[in-house]
């Protein structure tokens, strides 16, 4: 409940209305806590993905910006080594559809799938957040993204002016 309220407050700070911020925070946390990835589309996708990473994982967030045509595989172990001692940590993959997801994110995809099927037991990290780009340098998002978890569209919600308050980092903790 505390994590949901914290995320909702940060989403409201960004400009989501309180009812939408509460809805999205519940959906995001439900997906993450059962091991799914969360993807964001639309003009604010990057900003929301970063906000979720900061709100839920704080300093234990790694961000990877996918270049067009990337084929370098994101390896799990070096990611893990970059956040020593963190119980819960996250990976924010910015522009995940600038290249084929299986080409650069195969290990993350397998981890998310195995986790959501319960094959990894209680090991939920890393939590994965994708931002999807729109435009000529981006691939049309494939069905792989909704297979991994919910895809929330930032252009499908009304935004109000940001509150001007600072975003507050957070850190999920295990049971």
Image (cartoon, rainbow, N blue to C red):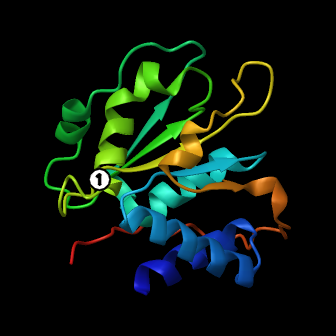
**Towards the viewer: 103 or 89:** 103
Q: Quadrant of the N terminus?
A: bottom left
Tell me what residue is drawn at x 50 percent, y 15 percent: 70
Q: Is residue 148 above or below residue 29?
A: above
**Towards the viewer: 161 or 106:** 106
Judge the density around disc 1: few (<14), some (14-19), many (≥20) Cα neighbours within 10 Å. Answer: many
Q: Secondary structure at mark 1?
A: helix
Tell me what residue is drawn at x 67 percent, y 34 percent: 141
16 displayed left or right of 64: right
Tell me what residue is drawn at x 29 percent, y 53 percent: 115
Tell me what residue is drawn at x 52 percent, y 46 percent: 147
Q: Is residue 34 above or below residue 99?
A: below
**Towards the viewer: 169 or 24:** 24
The residue that label 1 is drawn on is 115
Residue 137 visible in the snapshot: yes
Q: Position of residue 153 (x, y in %)?
A: 73, 54
Q: Position of residue 127 (x, y in %)?
A: 37, 53
- Residue that protrudes farthest toward the bottom in the picture: 1
Q: Quadrant of the C terminus?
A: bottom left
94 displayed left or right of 81: right
Q: Position of residue 44 (x, y in %)?
A: 73, 50
Q: Position of residue 171 (x, y in %)?
A: 34, 67
Residue 108 placement: quadrant? top left
Q: Is residue 119 above or below residue 166?
A: above
């Amino acid at each position: 409940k505390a994590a949901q309220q914290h995320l909702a407050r940060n989403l409201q700070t960004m400009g989501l209305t309180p009812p939408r911020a509460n809805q999205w925070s519940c959906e995001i946390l439900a997906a993450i806590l059962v091991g799914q990835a969360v993807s964001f589309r639309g003009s604010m996708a990057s900003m929301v993905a970063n906000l979720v990473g900061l709100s839920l994982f704080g300093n234990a967030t790694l961000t990877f910006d996918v270049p067009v045509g990337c084929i370098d595989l994101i390896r799990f172990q070096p990611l893990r080594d970059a956040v020593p001692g963190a119980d819960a940590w996250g990976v924010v993959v910015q522009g995940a559809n600038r290249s084929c997801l299986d080409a650069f994110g195969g290990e993350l995809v397998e981890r998310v799938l195995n986790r959501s099927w319960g094959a990894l037991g209680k090991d939920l990290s890393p939590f994965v957040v994708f931002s999807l780009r729109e435009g000529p340098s981006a691939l049309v998002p494939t069905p792989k993204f909704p297979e991994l978890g919910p895809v929330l569209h930032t252009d499908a919600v009304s935004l109000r002016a940001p509150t001007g308050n600072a975003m507050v980092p957070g850190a999920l903790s295990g049971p």
